[in-house]
Image: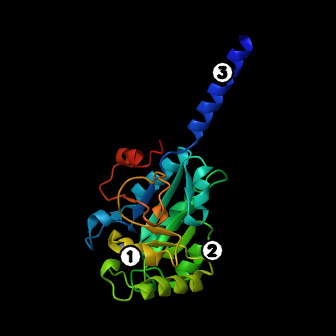
Amino acid sequence: MKQLIIVFVTWLLLGISTTANASEKVPILVYHSIAEFTGHGQKELYVTPENFEMQMRYLRENGYTMLTFESWQETENVSKPIFVTFDDGYKNNLNVHQIFHKLKNDQFLPAATIFVISDFIGRNNRLSVRDLKMLANSGMFSIQSHTATHPDLTKAANLDDELKRSKLKIEQITGKPVIALAYPFGSYNNQIIHHTQKYYLYGLTTTPGPYIKSGLKDEYLQLPRTYIKYSTTLDQFKEIVQTK
Ligand SMILES: [Zn+2]
């Protein structure tokens, strides 16, 4: 009887510890500009450097592991996996690099994915070729594709060109594989998925909510992302990044 109880208790403890380690939800966040809002564009697409730093500090202090899509498989192994992404490749994403530099230590390596519009690289308020090389070589950023010209892909005439040309151009700049695409305006359908998987392993939408494994075919080409906005409070942020 005693032995039976020991076996039962061990089984119970093992059971509890496995469920305690596995993350059921993988939050994928989307940002645009990390800068003070000075009246240009939509305010909600900005997050101040101060708020952004507070949010990243929260991740650091609470045991999150920041991942990029090259290491997607790690979502199954690491503690509290999370993806932080930036759309459109704004120059002010250099502020992110500065903040990451400040926050990294032996236990915490910040990481993020920047989805750039390949034809916009080097424009006035966008990251330049030099910026992208620097970010890609910093070990903290993955540079991925947000198409060549940022069309609504469901209406684009030159679909393969948008997908392929942008991938090749970014790979040429960074010397690293481009495997993820963020659909402009979060707009996609079955035909877009079909074309996207010719060149990419991951497709990012703007359907809010965390990723929860479904096992469905194509789930990696319809990954959800939640906006972090100018008005998002730290309490709301904490809620969004829950992994349980
Ligand atoms: Zn965009």
Q: CA distance from mark 2 to mark 1?
A: 34 Å
Q: CA distance from mark 3 to mark 1?
A: 52 Å
Q: Residues within 10 Å of mark 1 (few under 14, many from 20)?
A: few
User: Which of disc 1 and disc 2 is earlier in sequence?
Assistant: 2
The amino acid sitting under disc 2 is Asn
Any atom of ligand 1 within 8 Å of the CB at mark 2? no
Q: Is residue 109 visible?
A: no
Q: Nearer the viewer, mark 2 or mark 1?
A: 1
Q: How many angstroms separate mark 2 from mark 3 (CA)?
A: 49 Å
Question: Which quarter of the picture shows residue 41?
Answer: bottom left
**What residue did someone put label 2 on?**
137
- Quadrant housing the N terminus: top right
Closer to the N terminus: mark 2 or mark 3?
3
Q: Secondary structure at mark 1?
A: helix
**Horizontally, is 204 left or right of 173 in the view?**
left
Q: Quadrant of residue 16?
A: top right
- Element class at badge 3: helix
Reading the image, the residue beneath label 3 is 9
Residue at position x 43%, y 58% in the image: 29
Residue that numbered label 1 is attached to: 191
Extreme residue toward the top, this view: 1
Q: Amino acid at mark 3?
A: Val
Q: Earlier in the sequence, mark 3 or mark 1?
A: 3
Q: Nearer the viewer, residue 181 or 109?
A: 181
